[in-house]
């Protein structure tokens, strides 16, 4: 049976995707804050905050993989 090659790191690293998404939510938050109010501003704020939650989870997984946790995803 043939060995499946590893994917390149740029295809498996989620950090740039989360940073771009969080940045887009930040821009949307600023624009919506000055143009409208209510639900749209709250939605943009939630997206921005959840972007930081995503970055924290990525950091947590990397720390677990560095210390050799058996249940950590290897990136």
Image (cartoon, grey):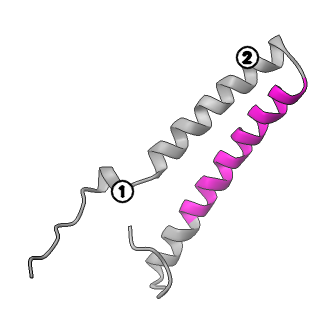
Q: Measuring 65% from the left and 24% from the top, which residue is drawn there?
A: 27
**How many residues crowd mark 2 within 10 Å: few (<14), some (14–19), many (20+)?**
few
Q: Is residue 74 above or below residue 15?
A: below
**How many residues crowd mark 1 within 10 Å: few (<14), some (14–19), many (20+)?**
few
Q: Quadrant of the C terminus?
A: bottom left
Q: Quadrant of the N terminus?
A: bottom left
Q: Is residue 75 magenta?
A: no
- Calculate the distance from the C-alpha at mark 1 to the C-alpha at mark 2: 32 Å
Between 4 and 57, the residue placed more toward the observer is: 4
Q: Which residue is mark 2?
A: 31
Q: Which residue is mark 1?
A: 12
Quadrant of residue 39 within the rendered picture:
top right
Q: First in sequence: mark 1 or mark 2?
A: 1
* Residue 30 coordinates in the image, percent (x, y): 74, 21
Seen as rendered, the residue at the extreme bottom is 70
* Residue 48 coordinates in the image, percent (x, y): 70, 39
Q: Label 1, secondary structure: give it.
A: helix
Q: Measuring 24% from the left and 60% from the top, which residue is drawn there?
A: 7
Q: Measuring 67% from the left and 30% from the top, which residue is drawn there?
A: 26
Q: Which mark is residue 59?
A: none
Q: Which residues are magenta?
A: 38-59
């Amino acid at each position: 049976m043939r060995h499946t090659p590893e994917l390149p790191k740029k295809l498996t690293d989620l950090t740039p995707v989360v940073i771009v998404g969080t940045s887009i939510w930040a821009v949307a938050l600023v624009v919506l804050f000055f143009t409208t109010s209510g639900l749209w501003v709250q939605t943009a704020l939630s997206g921005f905050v959840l972007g930081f939650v995503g970055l924290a989870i990525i950091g947590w997984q990397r720390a677990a993989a560095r210390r050799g946790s058996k249940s950590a995803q290897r990136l």
